[in-house]
């Protein structure tokens, strides 16, 4: 996911790799904290992947941070209300 985020942002060096990886990890923990199934986070499908990327962009793209943050919260809410993604549904 690191390389995908770097490509989206046009980053072609490794100066921010550590910070981006920290944000990826934070997004994964945030999704786990609302009950998203661990295996879906560890092997993300397109919905989980999009949510994680959006979370990271809310920190990385300062000019559009609020837009990405709001989008992430909506995506997280959709995942939280989709039974296939919630721990208790498994």
Image (tube, helix red, strand yellow):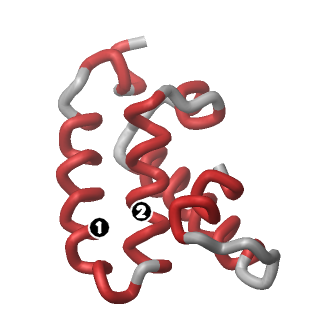
Q: Is residue 79 above or below residue 84?
A: below
Q: Residue at x 65, y 49 (%)?
A: 1
Q: Residue at x 42, y 79 (%)?
A: 61
Q: Is residue 23 above or below residue 88?
A: below
Q: Residue furthest top?
A: 90
Query: What label sits on residue 55 in the rendered view?
Result: 2
Mark positioned earlier in the residue sequence (1 or 2) = 2
Estimate the x, y position of residue 77 in percent, counting from the top left. 20, 45
Query: What label sits on residue 57 in the rendered view?
Result: none
Figure quadrant of residue 46: top left
Badge 1: residue crowd in 10 Å (few <14, some 14–19, many ≥20): many
Instruction: Say which element carries label 1.
Output: helix
Estimate the x, y position of residue 35 in percent, counting from the top left. 39, 38
Q: Is residue 7 above or below residue 57?
A: above
- Label 1 close to label 2 by CB (< 8 Å): yes
Q: Residue at x 50, y 26 (%)?
A: 45
Estimate the x, y position of residue 40 in percent, counting from the top left. 53, 27
Figure label count:
2
Q: Nearer the viewer, residue 89 or 69?
A: 69
Figure quadrant of residue 23: bottom right
Badge 2: residue crowd in 10 Å (few <14, some 14–19, many ≥20): many
Q: Nearer the viewer, residue 19 or 9?
A: 9
- The residues bearing labels 1 and 2 have C-alpha atoms spaced at a distance of 7 Å
Q: Residue at x 41, y 62 (%)?
A: 55
Estimate the x, y position of residue 90 in percent, counting from the top left. 43, 12
Apparent side of residue 55 relative to residue 68 in the rendered image (left or right): right
Q: Which residue is mark 1?
A: 68
Instruction: Say which element carries label 2.
Output: helix
């Amino acid at each position: 996911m690191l390389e995908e985020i770097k490509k989206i942002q046009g980053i072609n060096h490794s100066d921010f790799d550590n910070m981006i990886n920290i944000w990826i990890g934070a997004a994964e923990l945030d999704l786990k904290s609302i009950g998203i199934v661990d295996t879906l986070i560890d092997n993300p499908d397109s919905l989980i992947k999009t949510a994680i990327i959006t979370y990271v962009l809310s920190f990385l793209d300062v000019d559009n941070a609020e837009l990405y943050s709001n989008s992430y919260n909506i995506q997280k809410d959709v995942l939280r209300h989709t039974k296939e993604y919630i721990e208790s549904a498994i």
